[in-house]
Image (cartoon, helix red, strand yellow):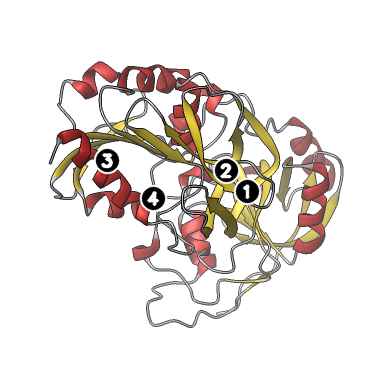
Amino acid sequence: MSREVRDAALVLADGTVFEGEAIGAKPEGGIASGEVVFNTALTGYQEIVTDPSYAGQIITFTYPHIGNYGVTGLDDEAARPFCRGVIVRDLARRRSNWRATDDLDAFLRAHAVPGIAGIDTRRLTRHIREAGAIPGAFGTAAESDLRAAAAAEPGTDGVDLVATVTCAEPYTVGGGRWKVTAYDFGIKRSILDQLAAIATVTVVPASTPAAEVLATGPDGVFLSNGPGDPAMVPYAVESIRGLLGQVPVFGICLGHQLMAQALGGVTFKLPFGHHGGNHPVRNLATGTVEITSQNHNYCVDADSIANAELSHLNLNDHTVEGLRCTDIPAFSVQYHPEAGPGPHDARYLFSDFDRLIARVKGS
């Protein structure tokens, strides 16, 4: 069945205009807005769209052909997408994969995610690289209305986006030998799959106090990925301060940033963030280079933490990719070792967490 062609436009907050056609869901009033970022992964579009870390953002796919292998519920990273929309160059008209249960356009409509296709994503990506992540609006509304919506869009700065994606109540997954509490700042299912192999994991809301967690006697605590500015989640930083030194801690992405803040560190926003599955990172302990999956807009200041050592370094821009505490059992990485999607070079970090718990427990 052919798809209805609806002319649409993307307008950035600086007035730059791109013309295309609407795909996915029809946004209210014909306008969708958010912070526009780009992702350089060549595959894994469904995992990217359903990653809660994209809350408040519009995802530009730099790879030109998106949707060719369809979608399947097996690849969802969350119960639903939290992104504000997607931008693609060419949306596949036909899916071709034995795993597929539907096509990407139908998936976007089912989950109320609007999109725009036919965009010169190379031009848009170059613009974001020069201007930085930028608010924008797209849809079928008049250009003047899109321009006003883009100008009014606040982006992700100064907003507690974690509160919009965290679970409402605790739940448990897995059946491994350890008892691990995982803070849900926007946790991905592929992370839970990795943790479940080593532990029985109790996932708790982001606002859960440290005392409540410690009262359950966990063998370890995991700090998950999530969206937005770590400075907007002070309640989580306070909880982490109460956990550090009491129990082994492992953090990923936003969890890494929040752990750094709990240690007295400072975070800052990168110009256009790291989003993709091909970022080279050096493991400073072994000297090896790992190709990693990344999705973050903020970063830890390397000189702001006294009692932790730099464990991993980004080879593109030399930003902090990992920390290891020197006086307590805690470590964290900025990238995504679960690799959903992406290469599996760094999945050893879940085994490192397993060994850290075993060492502390003396078993």
Question: Residue at the location (46% across, 44% down)?
Answer: 52
Spatial CA distance of label 1 from label 4 is: 21 Å
Q: Which residue type carries mark 2?
A: His
Spatial CA distance of label 3 from label 1 is: 28 Å
Question: Residue at the location (59% across, 57% down)?
Answer: 280
Mark 3 is surrounded, within 10 Å at the Cα level, by few (under 14), some (14 to 19) or many (20 or more) other residues, namely: some
- Whichever of labels 3 and 1 marks the residue nearer the N terminus, that label is 1
Q: Nearer the viewer, residue 346 or 137?
A: 346
- Whichever of labels 3 and 4 marks the residue nearer the N terminus, that label is 4
338 shown above or below 248: below
Q: Which residue type carries mark 3?
A: Leu
Spatial CA distance of label 3 from label 4 is: 28 Å
Question: Residue at the location (49% across, 76% down)?
Answer: 69
Spatial CA distance of label 2 from label 3 is: 26 Å
Q: Which residue type carries mark 4?
A: Ala
Q: Are marks 2 and 3 in contact (CB under 8 Å)?
A: no
The residue indicated by pointer 3 is: 356
The secondary structure type at the circle numbered 4 is loop
Mark 2 is surrounded, within 10 Å at the Cα level, by few (under 14), some (14 to 19) or many (20 or more) other residues, namely: many
Instruction: From the top left corner, tell me how far across and down residue 234 is, in percent.
Output: 47, 18
The secondary structure type at the circle numbered 3 is helix
Q: Nearer the viewer, residue 307 or 334?
A: 307
- Whichever of labels 2 and 3 marks the residue nearer the N terminus, that label is 2
The residue indicated by pointer 4 is: 78
Q: Are marks 1 and 4 in contact (CB under 8 Å)?
A: no
The residue indicated by pointer 2 is: 296
Q: Are marks 2 and 1 in contact (CB under 8 Å)?
A: yes
Spatial CA distance of label 2 from label 4 is: 17 Å
Q: Left or right: where does residue 331 sit relative to residue 260?
A: left
Which mark is in front, 3 or 1?
A: 3
Q: Which residue type carries mark 1?
A: His
- Whichever of labels 2 and 4 marks the residue nearer the N terminus, that label is 4
